[in-house]
Amino acid sequence: MKIHEYQAKQLFKDFAIPVPEGMVAYTKEGTVEVSYKIGYPCVIKAQVHAGGRGKAGGVKLARNRDEALRFGEEIIGMHIKNLQTGAQGKKVRKVLVEKGVNIVNELYLAIIMDREKAMPVIIASSEGGMDIERVAEKHPDHIFKECVHPITGLSNFHISRLSFKLGLNKTERRHFSKLVSNLYKLFMEKDASIVEINPLVITDTEELIALDAKVNFDDNALVKHPDIMELRDTDEEDPFEVEASKYKLNYIKLDGNIGCMVNGAGLAMATMDILKYYKGEPANFLDVGGGTSEERIKEAFKILIADKNVKVVFINIFGGIVRTDIVAVGVVNAAKSMNINIPVVILLRGTNEKQGRKIIEESGLDFIVETDLKKAALKSVELSRGDKDVNSCK
Amino acid sequence: MSILVNKDSRIIVQGFTGKEGSFHASQMIDYGTNVVGGVTPGKGGHTHLEKPVFNTVEEAVISEGANVSIIFVPAIFAADAILESANAGVELIICISEGIPIKDMIKVKHYLNTTNSRLIGPNCPGVITPNEAKVGIMPAQIHKKGRIGIISRSGTLTYTTVNQISIQGMGQSTSVGIGGDPITGSDFIDILKLFEKDEETEAVVMIGEIGGSMEERAAVYIKKYFNKPVVAFISGQTAPPGRRMGHAGAIITGGKGYAKEKMIALRDNGIHVVENPAEIGSTLKEILKKES
């Protein structure tokens, strides 16, 4: 789960990690009001779950009231786009207004979970303020890492090694040591999957301040942290995804036009892959799970049909422990209880697949029943295009 | 031969009397799997599905000589269940439970390194050696005894693959679901090592997916040490970066874990990579024909 920068900074404060003084505003008038309280110059930062805010013009320095008003107006309501937000981008609904800081030096500090080593890794760099992946490409010798063994935990030597490699002076080392141990504490206590400060700045008074803050959490651990769960901002999520999450459906919206309903995450990804292989465009990833009850299928149908881009629905179910004929009854009942006016291609395989197909065929629904993954995918692509010429592409 | 489990495995079920545990244990028993009992704290001394119930894994090991455990307990108790089995000396622990926090798993992983126990999963369908032992939640009837080893990070996609292989007239030596979490007890290399030594296994199918670099490491291992044909499929070729695709481990982060990189690494190391998931079985058949 992701949270906003201002929420991450509140968590930092709770763990005694220094952050600039700041307040949140939701309108241009609010931006002016808050800026006045903070004092000029102040920084106005878009609060949105998307990277690349600076490049998109979502971070501005305001030196007076007029600028605060202008930037508040510009930033609130703007859309920020990147690879993860899709073509539409994400709308900015609020800004964080922060007091300006006199920066002498910019560092980078993060803790991530390294899945190959199965350990948290602290990453620090003397090149703060830039994209860390670019630093890794250009100056790999400026990135320093310390793996922390989960059984012994964080030790002084980890921090000491990092601070000498970063070339910090005595006062800075003292601040850095406290900051790293507090950040590690936050990372472990709150089951974070990443905490990142970029930049971590050294001020003209030799203090260390987290100018930016990014914290993501391990979804599997959220049940242990109701306080973190409260920080979820559904405005930042796709409305279809929010609806799907209510029914514990694994749904991710994509930009294509073939609605997919699949049981199992791996098979759901493979279904997207085969559609793309035949030059089709999946509208979504959707794993209806192992249970595939009638109610879940109904909710899944609702979400797929509500997406106006969807021209055809492709149902791909491998009946394992849950027999295919039982899934078929669920599909029929769900479909009959609602108005589906786009074509549906259905592939049912696994236990009792023949009975399953028979139930669909005799239901009176005009579903296209396929027996083979390749044919079902080709048929879905054909229907999504409204032409009959797909066999020639591959 | 086969790997990991066979007709002589002595299996216990952790979470035996729960809904999931009961259902799958009875399916396993119906298949002929040698289930010797189960563990549910507080229900020791009872009988369930005509098998003894124990309070602790240690008691089950002492009383029944259990050497394999399958775990169905809720995610918040699952790390403890793994530790308990490892501590009691169970050789093979198969954890089906999904949703274990990663902070719990890293401790489990490092603890296991100090024991002789092997962990499969978590968040996996389990292991099956056709006609001998089904220690998992996979549908039994699609499997056929044969000479193809399967290693997969997925569930239903594995069943689809098994089905394709069976339809092509081939069968499986053992099919292993290693799980869809970011940190798993065993990876591709761990299982490849076993298949390399298994005389019954003629070729291996690897089902990988986006996230991490397990497939890349396996590719290098295969080129150096593995002497049987391998066919691989990587799911998530069209997955957007930064999104968790159902499995906790299926996520492209920090520019790493793309399907494309994995497919290139596998191909560069001489492994047959199938792009179309409908053609895994047929590709395997062609390759084996050529080899012979």
Image (cartoon, coloured by chain):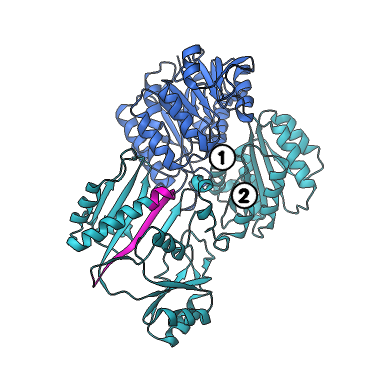
Chain colours: A cyan, B blue
**Residue highlighted by disc 2:** A381
Please state which amino acid type lies under the numbered disc 1. Answer: Leu
- Residue B253 in sight from this viewpoint: no
For this rendering, which residue is in front, A382 or B32?
B32
Q: Residue furthest front?
A: B42
Residue A381 in the image: above or below residue B30: below
Labels 2 and 1: the sequence-earlier one: 1
Residue A42 at what x, y percent from top left? 38, 78
Q: Secondary structure at mark 2?
A: helix
Most common secondary structure along the magenta stretch: strand
* Horizontal relation, residue A145 to residue A27: left or right: left
* Horizontal relation, residue A106 to residue A391: left or right: left
- Residue depicted at x 41% and y 59%: A14
Q: Is residue B58 a member of the stretch shown in magenta?
A: no
* Horizontal relation, residue A329 to residue B256: left or right: right
**Residue highlighted by disc 1:** A267
Residue A260 in the image: above or below residue B135: below
Residue A257 at what x, y percent from top left? 62, 55
Residue A145 at what x, y percent from top left? 26, 49
Neighbours of disc 2 within 10 Å: few (<14), some (14-19), many (20+): many
Closest to the camera, between mark 2 and mark 1, is 1
Please state which amino acid type lies under the numbered disc 2. Answer: Val
Range of the magenta residues? A186-205
For this rendering, which residue is in front, A372 or A41?
A41
Task: Tell me whether the residue at label 2 lies in contact with that at label 1, contact meaning CB atoms closer than 8 angstroms.
Answer: no
Neighbours of disc 1 within 10 Å: few (<14), some (14-19), many (20+): many
Tell me the distance, in whole angstroms, between the alpha carbons under discs 2 and 1: 18 Å
Chain where mark 2 sits: A
- Residue A299 in sight from this viewpoint: yes
Q: Secondary structure at mark 1?
A: helix
Q: Quadrant of the C terminus of chain B?
A: top left
Q: Is residue A189 a member of the stretch shown in magenta?
A: yes
